């Protein structure tokens, strides 16, 4: 079975995670367990040993070594959940064969198009078969494509009798909400090093990422009838707008790239009496990251002095840190990935992740874990797509990656 065929099955499972679920609930949505059980059964059919789905929704399995000699235990990891940034159920993928140029009609009824003028990355995909959405949901290539590629690589390894040491595979829940490694069983996984297969264009290799935090601002106002509101009403929505206006307008995702950090307002809701603003804070540099969080705190303190203590309540929580400082001590596993890519005809390109993966936290927990691409584009959006050929190539690269050396 080819990777895209597995992928088209996996995307029929709604696995959207929920950042508002209590922190002690894992997985954050029970529907993730449905795919987890499905994957565990498939792994058994592919010859994995000691396959289990634990109470938290993590799926583990191992391919036993098939050759002599001493070889490291290599781990491969992808996550099952999808982002809540776009609708994740009722996904209706289709394949645009041999894309040449021009706009792709995603949804004729609703006049939704995938346009090169908006997404120039389409130019890189001429001649490829593109898996697209119907323009009303995300696709789920982040990260069901990674799962499909890992299991297709496993099938390729067994069929081609690729010599390898022990291979550990894990599929995790709740990566999109920063909880993907909260209950990861490192001891049982037993890998010497691992790779996440999670996002990125074909050839991209990542071993440094954003430092990340979430921030929730609660604004408490005072409501009264607008006809009698003078000097009485304090509109929490307007106070929230005032807070947001204090943030640097050019330091948002749509105005930054590369190593540039940002503040991102994810969600804003409320009324005159109460409003909530949900942010994520990102920066590659740890010092700048801490400065960004401190700036949010100063802004809230300033406005509390202006409007009264307790008007603005800011809660911040670190999610993950830049794994570069860890990975610099283990560059041999990065070089191993580069060799595998070149062996399969793909020139590797080292890029910083403008986000994070489970690998970041696993690296800090003692398991060096750079990130490999899945080959897709426009993740977390209704315009997400992935070339069939990129998925084939990634399965080939993964098989080369774990080959005994």
Image (cartoon, rainbow, N blue to C red):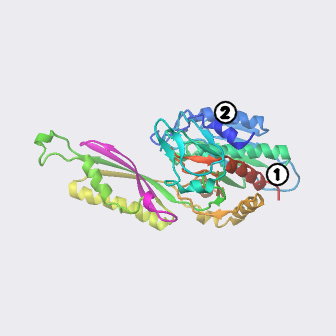
Categorize mark 2 by other alpha carbons within 10 Å: few (<14), some (14-19), many (20+).
Answer: few
Looking at the rendered image, the quarter that the C terminus falls into is bottom right
Classify residue 80 by image quadrant.
Answer: top right
Element under disc 1? loop
Per the image, the residue denoted by label 2 is 38
* Residue at 54% across, 56% down: 120
Answer yes or no: is residue 251 visible: yes
Q: Position of residue 17 (x, y in %)?
A: 52, 40
* Residue at 24% across, 42% down: 273
From what the image shows, is residue 276 above or below residue 30? below
Say whether marks 1 and 2 touch (CB < 8 Å): no
For the residues labelled 1 and 2, the Cα–Cα distance comes to: 26 Å
Q: Position of residue 223 (x, y in %)?
A: 19, 41
Q: Position of residue 49 (x, y in %)?
A: 77, 39
Per the image, the residue denoted by label 1 is 164
Which segment did they paint magenta?
253-281
Membership of 280 in magenta stretch = yes
- Left or right position of 250 against 399: left
- Left or right position of 327 against 43: left
Is tag 1's residue or tag 2's residue first in the polypeptide sequence?
A: 2
From what the image shows, is residue 201 above or below residue 327? above
Categorize mark 1 by other alpha carbons within 10 Å: few (<14), some (14-19), many (20+).
Answer: many
Q: Nearer the viewer, residue 1 or 227?
A: 1
* Residue at 32% across, 51% down: 313
């Amino acid at each position: 079975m080819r990777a895209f065929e597995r992928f088209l099955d996996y995307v029929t499972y709604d696995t959207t995670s929920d950042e508002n679920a209590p922190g002690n609930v894992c997985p954050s949505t029970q529907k993730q367990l449905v795919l987890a059980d499905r994957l565990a059964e498939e792994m058994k059919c592919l010859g994995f040993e000691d396959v289990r789905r634990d109470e938290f929704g993590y799926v583990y399995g191992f391919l036993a070594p098939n050759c002599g000699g001493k070889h490291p235990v290599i781990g491969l990891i992808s996550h099952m959940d999808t982002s809540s940034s776009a609708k994740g159920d009722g996904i209706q993928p289709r394949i645009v064969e041999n894309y040449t140029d021009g706009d792709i009609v995603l949804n004729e009824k609703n006049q939704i198009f995938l346009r090169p003028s908006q997404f120039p990355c389409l130019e890189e995909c001429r001649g490829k078969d593109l898996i697209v959405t119907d323009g009303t949901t995300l696709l789920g290539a982040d990260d069901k494509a990674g799962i499909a590629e890992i299991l297709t690589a496993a099938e390729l390894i067994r069929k081609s009798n690729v010599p390898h040491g022990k291979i550990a595979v894990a599929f995790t829940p709740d990566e999109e909400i920063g909880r993907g490694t909260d209950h990861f069983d490192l001891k049982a996984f037993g890998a010497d090093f691992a790779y996440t297969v999670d996002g990125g264009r074909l050839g991209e290799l990542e071993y440094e990422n954003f430092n990340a935090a979430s921030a929730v601002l609660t604004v408490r106002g005072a409501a009264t009838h607008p006809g009698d509101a003078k000097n009485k009403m304090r509109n929490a929505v307007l106070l929230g707008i005032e807070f947001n206006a204090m943030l640097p307008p050019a330091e948002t995702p749509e105005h930054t790239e590369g190593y540039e950090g940002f503040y991102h307002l994810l969600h804003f809701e409320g009324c005159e009496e109460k409003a909530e603003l949900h942010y994520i804070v990102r920066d590659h540099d740890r010092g700048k990251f801490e400065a960004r969080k401190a700036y949010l705190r100063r802004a809230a303190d300033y406005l509390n002095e202006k409007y009264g203590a307790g008007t603005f309540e800011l809660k911040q929580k670190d999610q993950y840190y830049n794994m570069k400082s860890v990975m610099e001590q283990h560059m041999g596993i990065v070089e191993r990935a580069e060799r595998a890519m070149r062996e399969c005809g793909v020139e590797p390109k080292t890029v910083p992740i403008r986000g994070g993966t489970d690998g970041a936290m696993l690296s800090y927990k003692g398991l060096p874990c750079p990130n490999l691409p899945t080959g897709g584009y426009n993740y977390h959006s209704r315009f997400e797509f992935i070339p069939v050929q990129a998925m084939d190539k990634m399965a080939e690269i993964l098989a080369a990656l774990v080959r005994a050396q």
